[in-house]
Image: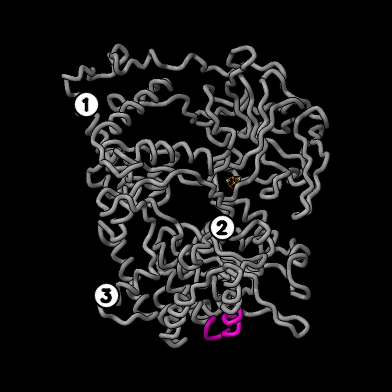
Amino acid sequence: MSSSSSSTTSSSTTSSVKNTSIPLPPPDAEIYHATCRFCNVGCGYDIFVFPIYKSGGPAKGQNAVVYNMNDQVFNRNLVNYQADYTSPVIPLGANYGTPWIGESMVTTTLKYNTNTGNWEPVYILEVPSSECPVNEGNYSTRGGKNALRNWSPFNDNAPGFKVFSTRIQTPLIRWNGSLQPVGWSYAIDVAARVAKYYMDNETTTYPSPVGPAATQVMAIRADHGGGQGGGVFSNLMPGLFLHMGLATPFVRFHYEVAFSFTQDALEEATNGNGTDTASMLDISIADVLVLWGINEYSTSTVNLIQHIFDNIDGSTISRKQTWFDPGEPAAAGNIIIVEARPSETVHAVAAKLGVSIQDAMNGNSDQFLFVQVNPGTDSELANAVAAYIYYTYPDVVNHFVQLYQSASSNGFAFNQDTYNYYIQYLQSKSLSDWLSEASSITGVPQNVIQKMGDMLAKPKSANGSTFYNRVLMEFEKGIIWSANYTPIYAVANLGIITGALSGRPGCGVSTGFGHQRGAAFPIPPPPPWQSNLSEGRQFFIQMHTYVPQQLKASGQTVSGTTIAEYIKNFYNQYTSSLVPQIYQYNPIIDYLIYSGYGKMLWMFTANPYKQTMSGEKLSQVLDNRSRLLQECVENTSSLGIPSSSSNAGTSPNYDTSAVAPQSLNSPPQTSTLVQ
Ligand code: SF4
């Protein structure tokens, strides 16, 4: 593939490196299919692996970029398609079957040849798949760098390409204040020996079959997401190791403070039916899309620019007609964004629709509403919108509630008691009180709250018939990390009364779209202070049963209002106290670390400094604790460890030269590149 222009520099500190060519995979390249590693959308990628001396050619049939998919849902036929690179790739060529392949989609690494017994240099190309219905060849700047995530002993991709020098080529160990490269076997040996010590010593004994548990080991681990098998396989191994081998109860996920659920409120509101209720197809045909605390443009890029944009610009109207009821109106979708600030997504949608952000905020557009809410007040907003709908569109609410009730005979368990409490709560104030109080708390003008209710619930009509909106709501860390339980439950309830949880095509309430939550691992044991250790792990407190019990036990009236007040106080305590009530079931790992507990911290596929609510505090505490430990070890002369790095190489414990990787620092030379 030719490159028509050379790179230029805008700064004297950046050297220009001319891009000359991208190696195309030969027809006999190994081909694998995977989802992107980076975000919840799960875009499909085709992975080509081939020796560096054996590139393919640009003409049809000379390369391995070949598709054979007839996607009848999204109406794309790529049967017997062969990519042609003899002329420049057209814009968005991947949509039509010929993906543009950028330099960051190529990496060079080593592969073991079982025939020759040698390690041989190979190219790995990770190319957004034109066949995949999720992305249709599209990708974000994150996904376009999937190839660079592969381990490699080399610094760059291919001769002549810009050097990517940030790659970590070996494990690193901190010695005398600086990180030093060590070999893999050395790193594995160190980690295994320390872990084994805590498996054999300083344990807490659980009932069979858990037995001794390494309670001095704390862990922060990924639990889902990412492609390349990340959802299942890369979670199974740490799961077996941490939860079964070490059996420590002190584990938390990468994005949560405890071993809990992100969306326990949604699980509860839907009686265990939970999240992940929508598909790409649903989002492309919804009448009303709600993005609540989710910055799609930055975090689920392809979902926004491919599927949401197709919906709101009217490209999917014929698809809607296929899936909607006979006679049901189908038009370009409407979109509501609830955010504490005008995020990148707000700007992108405003640009796409040609609506100014000011108009979107003031409720002047019937297609795009931007609801700028004061941080942490989302529950008040959701409940006020729900109250407006309840008072203004009672027929809509009754329609969906009757639908849920009748679906009970098909196994759908609608929680009537919880719903009754919810309605009591909505009835506890007049509509004008709801609107004025919510407006002063949330900062959202009353007319915008009403506009949001109208956009969600006002029925469609055609030829004298009434049709109910297909509402799809997505939420993410904007409410997960602000207060979690209360706003998510409020959004779920809003989803119930607007039919977003009705299970119809184009509907849903879920965390960020696509979320590939395939995970497989055993559950860790309960914390050692739990009274009955054989009861197993409890993930969260079921508030709809817990709160009425607590109110009755203290002689208080059980009503929608008293339950709501109890829950608000409960979660205020959660965020304001060091040891929240839920701690009895799910230890907050970061609090334990702050408090000096734990002797080994295992982090797996997680970046907790960026992904916890107090990342700066956590980083300071970890840095301080690890430095103190290191100084102590290095300054204890009886251990025989040298006190400076100058003689570290001769130390039996820190002989880094003996375990350094072989000299593979120069990139391999290629002779056959496609020009
Ligand atoms: S939107 Fe980007 S990061 Fe997310 S899965 Fe697709 S390519 Fe990967």
Let me know if residue 396 is in the magenta part. Answer: yes
Identify the residue at image location x=34%, y=80%.
558
Image location of residue 333, percent across then percent down: 67, 67
Image location of residue 482, percent across then percent down: 40, 61
Does the image show residue 395?
A: yes
Let me know if residue 222 is in the magenta part. Answer: no
Q: Tag on residue 553?
A: 3
Q: Amino acid at mark 3?
A: Ala
Mark in front: 3 vs 2: 3
**Local SS, label 2:** loop
Gap between marks 2 and 1 measured at Cα: 48 Å
Q: Is residue 635 left or right of 256 when viewed as pictured?
A: left
Q: Which residues are magenta?
A: 389-399
**Mark 2 lies on residue:** 276
Gap between marks 3 and 2 measured at Cα: 36 Å
Dot 3 or dot 1, earlier in sequence: 3
Tell me if mark 3 has few (under 14), some (14-19) or many (20+) residues whose alpha carbon lies within 10 angstroms of its own: few
Q: Is residue 129 left or right of 170 when viewed as pictured?
A: right
Identify the residue at image location x=29%, y=56%.
583
Dot 2 or dot 1, earlier in sequence: 2
| Residue nearest the viewer, comparing 281 with 21 | 281
Image location of residue 319, percent across then percent down: 76, 62
**Mark 1 lies on residue:** 633
Q: Amino acid at mark 1?
A: Val
Image location of residue 7, percent across then percent down: 64, 33
**Local SS, label 1:** helix
Secondary structure of the magenta portion, mostly? helix
